[in-house]
Image (cartoon, helix red, strand yellow):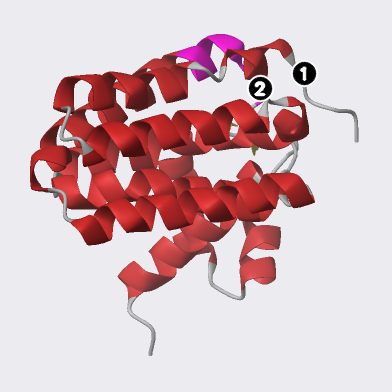
């Protein structure tokens, strides 16, 4: 028997990822029974997942009327951007003094895969590689508070990235990553942390788009 906590976590991640990748579109109505059938679980973990997603700003609920995917909200996305940038800055500050050569190489490898995915126009692979790149410092920082905050706010930014990823300057993103790596390798904590923050604040073009019609 699958533990309830695992069912709840799997339901949360599946619905969250469907919102982020656009399978569930902004403004789309959600029915817990249909979602439960789709995921092959009972309604309880789905309802718990929807409540958690509401806290993260990805779902809106009006009791007795509707539950829906939150429409794109530029103000909320900018708030998420500020928080996410600050958390990655903090992660780098805490991680870099103890970085090993293996962690530097892991960042370089992730950035190579990121560049290749951008070149191929593979949004899924690009975002996965970008997550891995930034995840090196987050993991090395070993700060559960940072991880928890990023878990809440990063999906909102990833959702926007998928709408206009191909229009972003991939070359600039790769170059920003390389700068972060070089500064980390040089143990320049201050500049590396600020470069990590700048990387997330460079996503401003994302806020100029609207959700496409379906």
- Secondary-structure class at tag 2: loop
Q: Distance between the residues labelled 2 and 1?
A: 7 Å
Residue hosting label 2: 72
Q: What stretch is highlighted in magenta?
A: 71-78
- Which residue occupies 9% across, 47% down? 98
In-front residue for pair 103/58? 103
- Secondary-structure class at tag 1: loop
Residue 29 percent location from the top left of the image? 73, 39
Seen in the picture, residue 119 relative to 69 is either above or below; the reply is below
Disc number placed over residue 210 in the picture, else none: 1
Q: Image quadrant of residue 103?
A: bottom left
Q: Can residue 77 be seen in this view?
A: yes
Q: Are marks 2 and 1 in contact (CB under 8 Å)?
A: yes
Q: Is residue 69 visible?
A: no
Residue 66 percent location from the top left of the image? 66, 34
Q: From the image, which quarter does the N terminus lie in?
A: bottom left
- Which residue occupies 71% across, 60% down? 34
Residue 24 percent location from the top left of the image? 72, 45
Mark 2: few/some/many CA within 10 Å (<14, 14-19, 20+): many
């Amino acid at each position: 028997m699958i533990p309830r906590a695992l069912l709840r976590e799997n339901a949360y991640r599946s619905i969250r990822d469907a919102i982020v990748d656009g399978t569930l579109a902004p403004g789309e109505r959600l029915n817990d029974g249909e979602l439960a059938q789709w995921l092959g679980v009972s309604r309880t973990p789905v309802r718990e997942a929807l409540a958690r997603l509401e806290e993260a700003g990805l779902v809106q609920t009006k009791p007795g009327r509707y539950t829906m995917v939150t429409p794109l909200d530029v103000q909320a996305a900018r708030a998420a951007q500020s928080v996410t940038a600050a958390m990655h800055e903090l992660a780098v500050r805490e991680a870099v003094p103890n970085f090993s050569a293996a962690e530097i190489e892991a960042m370089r490898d992730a950035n190579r895969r990121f560049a290749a995915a951008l070149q191929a126009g593979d949004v899924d692979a690009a975002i996965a590689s970008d997550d891995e790149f930034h995840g090196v410092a987050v993991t090395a920082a070993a700060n559960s508070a940072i991880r928890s905050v990023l878990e809440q706010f990063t999906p909102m930014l990833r959702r926007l990235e998928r709408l206009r990823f191909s229009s972003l300057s991939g070359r600039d993103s790769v170059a920003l990553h390389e700068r972060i790596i070089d500064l980390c390798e040089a143990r320049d904590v201050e500049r590396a942390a600020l470069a990590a923050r700048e990387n997330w604040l460079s996503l401003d073009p994302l806020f100029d788009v609207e959700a496409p019609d379906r």
